[in-house]
Image: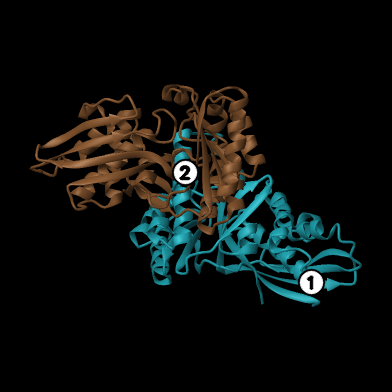
Chain colours: A cyan, B brown
Amino acid sequence: MEEIKLFCPATIANLSCGFDVLGLCLDNVGDEMIIRKTSEKGIKITKIVGADLPLETEKNVAGVVALAMISNLNLDFGFEIEIYKKIKAGSGIGSSAASSAGAVFGINELLGRPFSTKDLIPFAMEGEKLASGSAHADNVAPALLGGFVLVRSYSPLDIIKIKSPEELYATVIHPQIELKTSDARSVLKQNVTLKQAVIQCGNLGGLISGLYTNDYDLIGRSLNDEIVEPLRSVLIPKFDLVKQKAIENGALGGGISGSGPSIFALSKGKETAEKVAKAMSQVYEEMNLKYEIHVSKVNSDGIKIL
Amino acid sequence: MEEIKLFCPATIANLSCGFDVLGLCLDNVGDEMIIRKTSEKGIKITKIVGADLPLETEKNVAGVVALAMISNLNLDFGFEIEIYKKIKAGSGIGSSAASSAGAVFGINELLGRPFSTKDLIPFAMEGEKLASGSAHADNVAPALLGGFVLVRSYSPLDIIKIKSPEELYATVIHPQIELKTSDARSVLKQNVTLKQAVIQCGNLGGLISGLYTNDYDLIGRSLNDEIVEPLRSVLIPKFDLVKQKAIENGALGGGISGSGPSIFALSKGKETAEKVAKAMSQVYEEMNLKYEIHVSKVNSDGIKIL
């Protein structure tokens, strides 16, 4: 294989009570990427459509992860990468992660899969480090593996894929405001009460139980983030109302996607997820705030070869 | 049915990373209890063998929970309760919970099951309130339901039973020292770092995933309590060494049972659990400290009718 074309999915990290440990993969929201073997050694980003991102390999997340991956392989050829961005940077649905995950996945395919998909995660995390300063895994891992992904531990890295219940849909609304990652970080507190930690553990345990047992009600009851959502949600226009409307219209629950400003809701069934989308949109319609909205099944497979 | 004889199992609460939210039920460690219908109304504790506990109904956990349960039922008869204690009070394996759970379970059976087993939990929690001042559920719920039990939330009470992997065994060693609950509580800190809370969530998520997927290695990797164990374990003689010996001899992991002083280890298979028991015992043998040790399969069913 000399060339590969990929769908690189968007992802929801910091999934409510799963702050910093749980993410999921979306199905019909994502970038496209073409990767080609070249006789020239090294990595070249030859084209970026849809976003104003650097073409220099060392400054582009796809470039950086590709370099990290091939650095020890002693190849006598190289790769060029074309990126067709559809996920807006800064939206909170894993724009950089899609590019990072896509680059390592695609190159691995073109090399005949020397790495397992899980082994690709640390390379892809290098892109997150470039994009946000922290090598987090809760976007790149679901982009690569699909479904829900638990980051049990970072040292050592321990990633657990959890299959999504068949009828679980996500609705994600992206209000078109700029929310700087630094601002989203600065509102976090370094300490939480023991009681908050216990409540968060109870909910995360419930959410994971619900995923394994296809218990949609339990998933809904567990989607409470006691720690981060109360602090960050004030940075997102009408967060409480958007979430409330989602739940009133049948969503199981919801929260902040990544570090925002996107808001997600989970629903049982496509029809409900679409009704929820309409209700969430209505809030921003009424205040004349531009937004994008996505309704997507949870993507069980992750990156797809097109 | 006029009389019922029960096995009331011991339980492990505060299961490592599941502090305050996760407990399990033991299989061959527990009290026995006989409950009889009486023509006289009310509840009488007629016999307690094996422990120096109050016979007055209002001061005995079995009495208190039985009263709470029948208070709204307008019965023209009553019950008498005989308790054969085998679980030592203050051992950290749910001695009071066994009596509380046994009393409500047995009376429910004699009444023809007006309550579901889950509905019995709030009554049984009244006994924990009498015994320890806090109406916690992570001993009484596993005693009643069996297996592993997650307390997702206290308000409202939301209890999730998780089936135990078939070959999972617990080894529990009880060093015969007195550890006051008030001391075990006083060493806790009211605040934890956000990082600790995230690590705890990751491990709890991993543990619950491991239980659903019968992944013994994942269960083992997840048995880390970053928050409570480092503070409480200093109150338990040679805790670190006992745990280390358990793991060196094949245990998946372990921690403090309840609020101590018992130490538990989980193992795959009875043979390993017994080897682990020998290694744990050896530590206390060498320091001439009296101990009791138990090896038990995780009990899937909870309380048993004998």
Q: Amino acid at mark 1?
A: Gly
* Element under disc 2: helix
Image mark count: 2
Which residue is drawn at the image coordinates 60% and 40% (left, top)?
B276
Q: Residues within 10 Å of mark 1 (few under 14, many from 20)?
A: few
Is circle 1 on the same chain as circle 2?
A: yes
Task: Decide: few, some or many residues near mark 2? Use Cα within 10 Å; few <14, some 14-19, many ≥20.
Answer: many
Circle 1: element type? loop
Mark 2 is on which residue type? Gln
Q: Which mark is residue A112?
A: 1
Which label was assigned to residue A200? 2
Give the quarter of the figure containing the N terminus of chain A: bottom right
Of mark 1 and mark 2, the one earlier in the sequence is 1
B14 is higher (above) or lower (below) than B185:
below
- Could you tell me which chain the residue with mark 1 belongs to? A
Alpha carbons under labels 1 and 2: distance apart: 42 Å
Q: Identify the residue shown where x is 58% and y is 29%.
A: B239
Where residue B253 sits in the image (x, y, percent)? 59, 42
Among the 4 quarters of the image, the one containing residue A149 = bottom right
